[in-house]
Amino acid sequence: MTNRQAVIVGAAETTGLGKLPTMSNLDLHVDGAFNALADAGLAPGDIDGIASIGSDPIDVARALGIHASYLDSTMVGGCSSLFHLRHALAAIESGRATTVLITHGESGRSRVGGMHFGFAPDSNIAQFEFPYGPVGPPGTFPMGLLRYMKTFGLTHEQLASVSVAQRQWAAMNPRAMMQSPLTIDDVLASPILAYPIHLLECCLVGDGGGALVVTTTDRAKDLDLPYGAVRVLGSAEAPEAPMISMMEDLTTSRAFRECGRRALGEAGLSHSDIDHLMIYDAFAFLPIYGLEDLGFLGRGEAGSFIAEGRTAPGGTLPLNTNGGGLSYVHTGMYGMFAIQESIRQLRGTAAAQVEGVEVSMAHAVGGYFWAAATLVLAKA
Amino acid sequence: MVTPIVPTPTPLTTPFWEGCAAGELRLQHCVNCESPFFPPQNRCPRCLSSDIAWAPVSGRATLYSYMIQHRPAPGFEDRVPYAVAIVQLAEGPRMMTNIVGIPNTPEELVLDMDLEVRFESRETISLPVFGPIGSMS
């Protein structure tokens, strides 16, 4: 009997990370693609499907000489790579594709050959938000944070402790852009970009990318995989709001809540089964929303949970163990890096390896709460 | 000199901007379920009815949340630091705005404070902003 169940057989990031001024977006895609293909023991000619953000899949297909029969350019912000993986599973399991390459590459810092983000002057966001002068992600994304702080009593010190905990993980990771120790006082003494957010509560801006290779269980059996394949036990995706001012409630993400519930439900698991967790941290407040909205904690509990070190090295719920967008790298769309760290933890190859990781959850947001996606991953 | 972004109306949003030009905050109301909504769209977001009418609202609001921008958007160089806020209109919908007539500091900007609409001229557009009640300057 054939087994078309899809598994991840290749996973790798770009060779370099952080500051790569000679590489374009597409160069980063290709570098990550070759690394992931080598990881799987495959060649471009084995690929029949391509999904990408940062460069168009048509560009990636051309650059790798692949005559693909499946393309996915779903672009919903930083969680797009999670969407791509989820869609690739469906494509493979329904027979539309056999082996899909998912790439992300973004010259977020050096801005070489990048993509153009823009909104028409008569779009809703350009009519009803931009005229008031919100400045980029730091001045827009945490717009509900003061309301959250007032509602639940979250303190500035607790918020700063998110950056401190993640730096503790990054200190063990030679590839992390920021590794030197950090204190709460350091975070609170850093410049305010947009009150109540300090510079050290914002993600980094770097260059990099990564890629995944997904194929059928049957095909995976023929490969010599040193760490085995990784399976997606459950997954979910959801839209939220096209503008931050249109969220139903700015102290909680409906998309996070729905994704967490559906992904765990599909996996048939409960929160206590999750050994390791990645929550996209474009800003320090996002792991707080994530822990609560994904159902790991009750509303208002995450600030003290993180401040007590429960997510830091040695804590009960290891979170963002690569250092996260705050200390590892953030190219603009970080989702691929969250998936890569979940896979490394399952394989036992992470720089800051947690003992006995059998199930990992990766959760990502797109845009300013535009969309979200969640994956529950385990060794196949 | 760099100027702030000026909204470009569409056929759908023109009644909103015409209201602002007349010194009145007008929102769409669903005739079927009687709920006001924002931003403009052709069907009620609650009941999906296309029976929609424009009508003025009170202009009263409370301060829902905000961020104080320490780096200026283009055209906001002489205002920094300034608040970008989300207010909750008395009728329910929320909108992004600026807060005028009061220092834009964490001490002065208290969540849930009462505000009322006023209009700021920006080239061809009258832009709704909010300030403390009775402090019209």
Image (cartoon, rainbow, N blue to C red):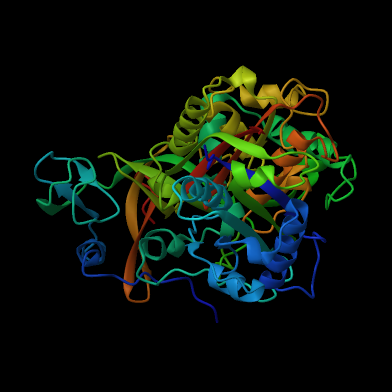
Above or below for A378 versus A325: above
Q: Residue at x 83, y 23 (%)?
A: A314
Above or below for B15 versus A121: above
Which quarter of the rendering shows the C terminus of chain A? top right
Q: Residue at x 73, y 61 (%)?
A: A32
Q: Residue at x 81, y 29 (%)?
A: A354
Q: Judge by depth and name the residue closer to the eye, B10 or A321.
A: A321
Q: Judge by depth and name the residue closer to the eye, A6 or B6.
A: A6
Apparent side of residue B87 relative to residue B18 in the rendered image (left or right): right
When asked about the image quadrant of residue A33, the answer is: bottom right
Q: How many numbered badges does the structure rendering display? A: 0
Apparent side of residue A218 relative to residue B64 in the rendered image (left or right): right
Residue sitting at the far front: A1
From this viewpoint, is residue A197 visible? no
Apparent side of residue A233 relative to residue A330 in the rendered image (left or right): left
Where residue A176 appears, as percent x and y from the top left, is: 83, 49
Apparent side of residue A283 relative to residue B37 in the rendered image (left or right): right
Where residue A331 appears, as percent x and y from the top left, is: 68, 58
Q: Judge by depth and name the residue closer to the eye, A193 or A377.
A: A377
Q: Residue at x 71, y 24 (%)?
A: A317
From this viewpoint, is residue A63 visible? yes
Where residue B54 appears, as percent x and y from the top left, is: 15, 55
Where residue A277 appears, as percent x and y from the top left, is: 67, 32
Q: Judge by depth and name the residue closer to the eye, A281 or A156.
A: A281
